[in-house]
Image: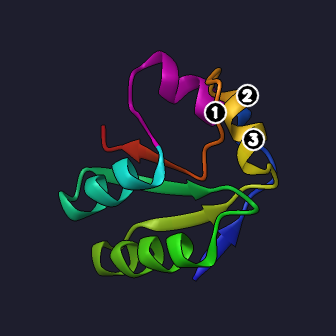
Amino acid sequence: MTKKIENINDMIKDAIATKRLLIGAKSVIDGLRKKKLSRVVLAKNCSEGTKNDIAVLAKLSGIEVSVAEQLNDELGILCKKPFSISALGFLKV
């Protein structure tokens, strides 16, 4: 169901620079419904409810879901945001 990844720093920085990153569970769920995403990354401590909602939509869309080693507050720091981030969505090219 979910694949664990070790280092997403470069992937996040590239997506931010090219404006291809959706931040937050609501945005990711909306992006999955509209079939705009190529990949989803969840924080290590993402809630089970959010994880299950995203996993179901991702499976229907054939999108890979990965679990980062970072906690949600660490993902917020990586994205240079003053809040915790539980889910990231990478837009299709």
- Mark 3 highlights which residue? 73
Question: Left of 91 or right of it: where is 82?
Answer: right
Residue at 78 percent of width and 44 percent of height = 7
Residue annotated with mark 2:
77
- Which residue occupies 22% across, 59% down? 35
Give the x, y percent position of residue 19.
39, 23
Identify residue type, mark 1.
Phe
Residue farthest to the front, as pictured:
83
Q: What residue type is disc 2 on?
A: Ile
The image quadrant that residue 57 belongs to is bottom left
Q: Report the magenta residues as a range.
A: 10-23
Instruction: Say which label, 1 or 2, has the lower sequence index.
Output: 2
Q: Residue at x 66, y 63 (%)?
A: 46
| Quadrant of res 78 | top right
Q: Position of residue 26 (x, y in %)?
A: 37, 53
What's the distance in space between the residues labelled 3 and 2, CA to CA? Answer: 6 Å
In the picture, measured across the screen, residue 16 lies left or right of residue 44, that is left
